Amino acid sequence: MKKIQSLFPLRRISILFLLLLHIATALLVTYTYLTVTDTLSHNRLWESTKTTLGKGVMGAYTFMYSPIALHEDRLNLGAWHGFQELIFRRALALREISFDCYLEEKSYLVFIFNKDETGFDGIRISTHPLFKNIYFTATPDGKFLKKKPVPGGPVTPGEWHQVEIVFSRDSFSLIIDNRLITQFAGTVKASQQIGFRGSLQNVTVDNVRAYGPKKTLLFQEDFSNRRAYILTFCIVFLGIGVFHLLFFGIRSLVRRDGGSSLKNRIKVSIILLGIAGSFYLFIYHVSTRYPRLTPALKAQEDYWMDSTSEYIRAAISKKYSMVPDDDFRILFLGSSQTWGAGAMDSDRTFVRITEANLNEHDDDVSYRCINGGISAIDTRELFYIYQKEWIQLDPKMVILNLSSNDSDPLLFYEYLEKLVLLNEAEHIRTVFSLEANSIEYQPGPLPLHAVMKEVARKYDVPIIDLHGYLLTHYDDGFLWWDRVHLAPYGHVLTGEFFADKIKKIVRKESIRLSHGK
């Protein structure tokens, strides 16, 4: 009898230990599941502006559908090529907002407010020497209409800062780390959208709280995936119990020798806990790294697939007759930047804007700009497509906007030269455009720009320095979606610049022809 009684405490301890193992395993599985599913698409409160583009850019959907953007339950606007912009889906009667932010070296964060179809306002907080702290108003496409400096200098990089913005009827106050920085006069819209935009470098946002009139909490956001934590835990815990029932069999519940069965259950539970722990560590490690583009992620990027070579070649063949007409045809050759990645739609790429600007004040010549941009292509492949197909379009001018996708300077030189000589034989004017990159990525010339200049000198090819032009206008608005793809206002600037340069080249060539040169 005493022996039997002595077994009861041991059995109770074993059952309690087994229960604790179940709880620990369920907690780990729950936390792992919530980490994997902690994405902006699952969050549903925010919309990525990049996913609304008619001419998409890399990483737009993977930013929304992968956990990297919300790693450690914080929003990283530098993930997936940076320059991410998130807009809160609902319009708010905003009176106050607060959030925490962490800025790396040479980064900045823009808080967007007063956003509607007419434009938006913003406050930029920066650690970047080129991008000062400012308050600005902007057009819908991101052109700054006015800028006012924010006093106090840049915030300290590598530290968390708390930002508060308090709105009144005709002004607002900026408070950083409980210190009033400045007040600005400005009308606060009764209903507005808000959002955040980052730089190329990582910028982290957390603990967003928005208040309406009378300090009413409109929403709070910690970018965690904890809304269904208890329900998920209960489902997982029950699932572990069902697993044990199936694994050991219902018969084991009524066996007399339960100690052996209990011991086996504890062993299995320890193994399950070890597997769950290992899987959690793996997921936590993977969530900080960029995944390969799986078929699922690739399917989410299908909106960008009309930039492929086959699609563009077929579209050009269908749209443009091979028979010459009276238009002054200009063929743009390039990669995804030329194709128009980052534009709101096909009519607002810089090629279309160039055409509109050329024809706006010129009744004597009808310009037709043909977009021969193909994503991820290099000069060699582009030359063969042009030689085989597009030279039959009878362009008067070919503009090569290249260098980002080429890596071999000798091959680059060779095929630039081949294209120039081919055009000379067909009496087609070649123009080189020094492809632009963001000043945050490449503040000086791109490595292959020197090759383009060398070929241009040898064959008297006009050069349009697009990279240099955009460097001088780097803070006129939002120009970039990543290091190489232009934002809507970047397309506007580029189209206006190209139109101006093309007109000058055409006038110069006409003068030379009139003198018989």
Image (cartoon, rainbow, N blue to C red):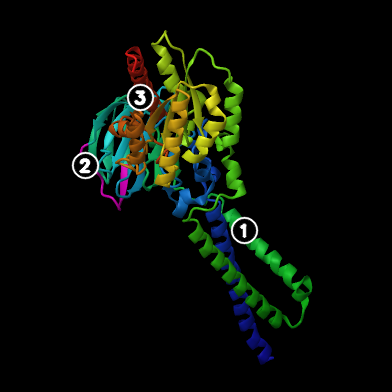
Residue 242, how many percent across, how many down? 70, 64
In terms of sequence position, does the residue under pointer 1 or pointer 2 come before the other?
A: 2
In terms of sequence position, does the residue under pointer 3 or pointer 2 come before the other?
A: 2
User: Few, some or many C-alpha atoms within 10 Å of disc 3 (few <14, some 14-19, many ≥20)?
Assistant: many
* Amino acid at the residue labelled 3: Phe
The residue under the point 30% across, 53% down is 158
**Which of the pair 83/351 is nearer the observer?**
351
- Residue where numbered disc 2 is placed: 153
In terms of sequence position, does the residue under pointer 3 or pointer 1 come before the other?
A: 1
The residue under the point 51% across, 26% down is 346
* Amino acid at the residue labelled 2: Gly
Does dot 1 land on a helix, a strand or a loop? Answer: helix
Does dot 3 land on a helix, a strand or a loop? Answer: helix
Q: CA distance from mark 1 to mark 2?
A: 50 Å
**Which of the pair 384/363 is nearer the observer?**
384
The quarter of the picture where residue 466 lies is top left
| Total tally of numbered discs in the picture | 3
Q: Which quadrant is the N terminus positioned in?
A: bottom right
| Extreme residue in the left direction | 152
The quarter of the picture where residue 246 lies is bottom right
Residue 339, how many percent across, how many down? 49, 32
Give the magenta range. 151-163
* Amino acid at the residue labelled 1: Cys
**Which of the pair 113/431 is nearer the observer?**
431
- Residue where numbered disc 3 is placed: 497
- Residue where numbered disc 1 is placed: 234
Does 253 sit left or right of 135 as displayed?
Answer: right
The residue under the point 38% across, 31% down is 433
Q: Which quadrant is the C terminus positioned in?
A: top left
- Residue 396 drawn above or below residue 381: above
